[in-house]
Image (spheres, rainbow, N blue to C red):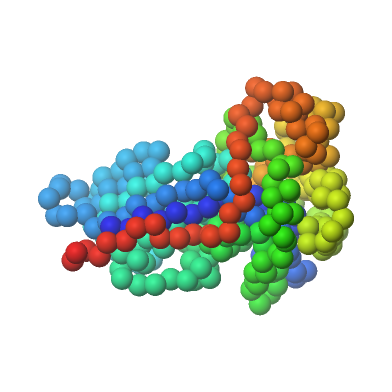
Amino acid sequence: MVITQTPLRMSFAGGGTDFPQFFQKHGGSVIAATFDKYCYVTARRLPPFFAYKSEICYAETERVRAVSEIRHPAVRNALLYLGMENIRLTYECDLPARSGLGTSSAFAVGMLSALHTLQGKTADKRKLADEAIYLERELCGECGGWQDQISTAFGGFHRIDFSADGYTVKPLVISPARKSALADNLLLFFTGVTRHSAEVQREVAHTLGNKTAELCATLRLVDEAERILTGTESLDSFGRLLDELWQRKKALSPVISAERIDGLYERAKNLGALGGKLLGAGGGGFLLFYVPQERRQAVLCELSELVHVPFRLESGGTRILYYRAEDE
């Protein structure tokens, strides 16, 4: 039996530049961090005592006699890709799926890690990120960028640079005190709206060819975000930069935001938030705000109808929590 734990992620800057159709021509960069909310995957061999051959438990429970019958596309394609069957696999997550936190990619990374381990093989974080990208983008045919798979696999506060040759991951050197101060100024709220990110990503991808100038401007702001985060100036500058980045992201497609989301955002800004963004592809999910400490309570009270999610940043990335070999 194997149990894996994979963190969820929040992206701060550069979203959209991680689409291959953009970065293969112009380069791309994102700044993101993982935090202490996780998805868990448990995998084990299914003993031959049942009428079914595999059991998959997520929001639904599937019991099938052949891998090809599994409805969940990521599970079906992962098992076919690795040549595995007779598997019992379960998925749990601390926060809702389809909410802009990279849950589907965290699941893909954690599942691949569990399945490789069940085969008695070791897969490092780059291999897991690469295979999760291949699984979601190629085998499942889902539209989107590459940052989620990489962020959830590697973990930590990092910058990912993309090019026609692939990608590199660079941890951002930020003192523990400054990182803690940043987290203290961030507020995370669940809007109550979930959506399939691939659907939003597909709509956004259709517009990318006409948004090259906007994405290049966003790409340049990633350098500014890194300069502020790793420097010594007030972190409030980062909050204001988040606002600029959010306005640029909304301009990419009308499906990224919505009237209710814009209303929540303006209410928070009117009470002292310096900036923020809707996490993930857009359309719903979680709103992140940068709020100076003296205005924190006012914003919490103003948005009291939303679920506030306290969090801390983490640095471990995906990991194996438990492993017991089959012959033990």
* Residue furthest front in the image: 177
Residue in view at x 66 percent, y 59 percent: 157
Quadrant location of the N terminus?
bottom left
Visible residue check, residue 48: yes
Quadrant in which residue 215 is drawn: bottom right
Whole-percent x, y for residue 173 in the image: 72, 65
Give the image quarter of residue 158.
bottom right
Q: Total label count?
A: 0
Q: Residue at x 83, y 39 (%)?
A: 274
Q: Position of residue 29 (x, y in %)?
A: 73, 64
x and y percent of residue 247 in the render? 82, 44
Relative to residue 256, is residue 38 drawn left or right? left
Residue toward you, 323 or 196: 323
**Quadrant housing the C terminus:** bottom left
Toward the bottom, the furthest residue is 165
Residue 175: x and y in percent read 72, 60
Q: Residue at x 70, y 68 (%)?
A: 161
Residue drawn 53% across and 46% down?
37
Q: Is residue 299 above or below residue 237?
A: above
Left or right for 5, reference 137: left
Q: Is residue 19 visible?
A: no
On screen, residue 328 versus residue 17, left or right, reads left
Q: Is residue 182 left or right of residue 54?
A: right
Q: Within the image, what quadrant is residue 28 found in?
A: bottom right
